[in-house]
Image (cartoon, coloured by chain):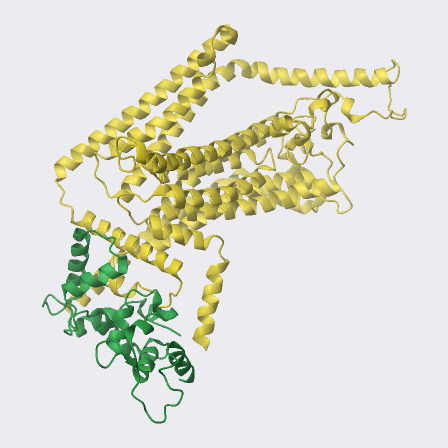
Chain colours: A green, B yellow
Amino acid sequence: VYRLHGRYHEMAPNVVPMDYTKDPDVKLPMQLIINMPELKENPFKERIVESFSEDGEGSLSFNDFVDMFSVLSEMAPRELKAIYAFKIYDFNTDNFICKADLEKTLNKLTREELTAEEITLVCEKVIEEADMDGDGKLGFADFENMISKAPDFLRYYVKK
Amino acid sequence: KWMKFQRDFENFKTACIPWEMKIKEIESHFGSSVASYFIFLRWMYGINMILFGLTFGLVMVPEALMGKPYGSLPRKTVPRAEEATAMNFATLWDFSGFAQYSVLFYGYYNNQRTIGWLKFRMPLSYFLVGVGSIGYSFMIVTRTMAKNANDDGGGDDTSFNFSWKMFTSWDYLIGNPETADNKFASITTSFKEAIVEEQESRKEENIHLTRFLRVLANFLALCTLAGSGYLIFFVVRRSQQFALEGLENYGWWERNEVNTVMSLLGMFCPTLFDVISSLENYHPRIALRWQLGRIFALFLGNLYTFIIALMDEINLKASYFLSFTLEEEKIVKYNMTIWEASLYNGTIPENSTAPPIQVDPADVPRGPCWETMVGQEFVRLTVSDMMTTYITILIGDFLRAVFVRFFNYCWCWDLEYGFPSYSEFDISGNVLGLIFNQGMIWMGSFYAPCLPAINVFRLHTSMYLQCWAVMCCNVPQERVFKASRSNNFYMAMLLFILFLSTLPAVYTIVSIPPSFDCGPFSGKTRMFEVISETLEHDFPSWFGKVFGYASNPGLILPFILLMVLSLYYLNATSKSYKEANLELKKKLQSVRIEN
């Protein structure tokens, strides 16, 4: 935690106090966070920061910051990671991953290299494969079910 | 902490594999089928390294260190007549001169039974290395085929295919922009590949039309093959006639007709096959296999008709040739005794108690050495093949890309989308080139121990050159498809070529007497006699007896029968296992669907 505090402090030395005993109310804006080297190349950096921030706008207090790194670390249990992964991919925060969310995810992943036809095809296939309750979008249960069988999930969702 | 250590170790292991980064980069931009060519190239490099190790360590180095040095024996010295040009670059490039009379070729080796203080048995080692490299190659190709067959049984029809690609492919640990670029490219390619698979499985087939078109396409391909075979035959016959009438009467075309026709066929027929295959409407991976198979048949057919036509020619000269060699042997031996006699001032000594007169070995008359000539031909062929490939890459890909890029501004139509455009990476052509090249190495390495070394060098440079050329001058294909996880198709072709190329060497070992004046087997009537000689001298006598009994046909035939039966049994059991596997998989799927 001490190291994390050091990193947090580095990002905005004039704002973040070294002393947290008085529990100050300091928040760092999103722009600073997404420029961190660990997050810089990540296509989902904005979503990651948004899903951990309390006010939903993307500013992280130190607690949120610690939360983010603890979920992304190796120690976090798989279910916790699945919860936060679902939040990250849910772009319109309606607690369902609908087709529009899928399209946005795909575009971010491929940097918009695929044609519209290909995008529709992939999104349809995803819904076909993972939607168990048949409502045309992925609820958390569907997502959890699908992720729990994936071999690569843990490997890629880990940060040190 | 333990997990961290494990991760680091995995990273280290991957970093140790040569060229892994390059190949991953190519895979992310061009797809796994192009990358499979480079993986194949790397595997061949490994095999050639081992062959090089065998020939270098067990044949060339002992001879260089412990054999008689250059200039001590007639067979090891450049003849007086050639001495003036022996060091010229042109002669060396042609592998004559000093290169010919060195450890690089068969003719240099002495037939002394043991050399040096270690009593290293040179002829035996030469023979065993030759046989051993072929045996090793067979073993490793078959082993790789078996391993790939195991992998293949897994099958890649997992459920949640697309979902996993979407949600779990990004690696959250990436912090480097270049790595991120590669990762984006590889994700995109992976999606495209999966999309192609999906489209292929959804295609509605009008079965009758497709079947008709495929039959038509195969018929056209057969016609092309037959046509090219006949053309080669016709042209070779004509060139024989020209040769009979004397080549001086004809111009350049007639003299080089055969070579030009073969090269032209090699250039145009594959394109023709490409056009034909568009009729067939196969999955791209299967289309690639048909293309490979047809081009393979084309080259084999050409080679076969060429050899048949040559055989007629050789048969005319064959008996003449054989008797000529025997005659020439006698003549040369006679000449040598006469020459020695002239040294002894006219009297042919009855016994050889007179002290031998020191003669410079360069002046001794030589006998013919066909093995070295064959070895030289192979080496020249390999070198010229290498040069041709490099120049084709430079001109065909690089200059074309430069031309398209820079002249696009001042040209009437859009060069990048229209006619020349950037070239795609020609997988089938390159794979076949690699396989045929390896076939030549296998054929020639018995006569020229330097061939694996040359090939190692060639593969090394070719890897770098082609990686660079692919990334810089080629564009990915329109429809990127996933290579089948096993490379068994390439392996099967390689095995076939290996079998074909060992036939000439085996034939010469068993039937043709070695040259009497050069090489480690000179003086014997057949090359494999070195084995029987070793058995007599070096092993205890009971060993020889046991071997004699074992080589009795009465024992060998039942042994062969037993092997055939066990092959059949193993094949049957493996089939039943595969079927059981499929049944279990189906059951799993139905259980999963129920839930």
Rendered residue at 29%/79% (across/down): A60
- Residue B431, placed above or below residue A34: above
* Residue located farthest toward the right when viewing the structure as drawn: B354
**Residue B156 rendering spot, x and y as whole percentages:** 28, 56
Please tell me which residue lies in front, B446 or B380.
B380
Instruction: Tell me the quarter of the image containing the N terminus of chain B.
Output: bottom left
Asked if residue B551 shows in the view, the reply is no
**Residue B353 rendering spot, x and y as whole percentages:** 89, 25
Compared across the picture, whether A157 is left or right of B318 comes to left
Instruction: Tell me the quarter of the image containing the C terminus of chain B.
Output: bottom left
The image quadrant of residue B547 is top right
- Residue B541, placed above or below residue B513: below
**Residue A90 rendering spot, x and y as whole percentages:** 19, 70
Please tell me which residue lies in front, B435 or B586.
B435
Rendered residue at 77%/43% (across/down): B116
- Residue B313, placed above or below residue B538: above
Asked if residue B286 shows in the view, the reply is yes
The image quadrant of residue A143 is bottom left
**Residue B422 rendering spot, x and y as whole percentages:** 33, 38
Rendered residue at 60%/26% (across/down): B373
- Residue A84, placed above or below residue B511: below
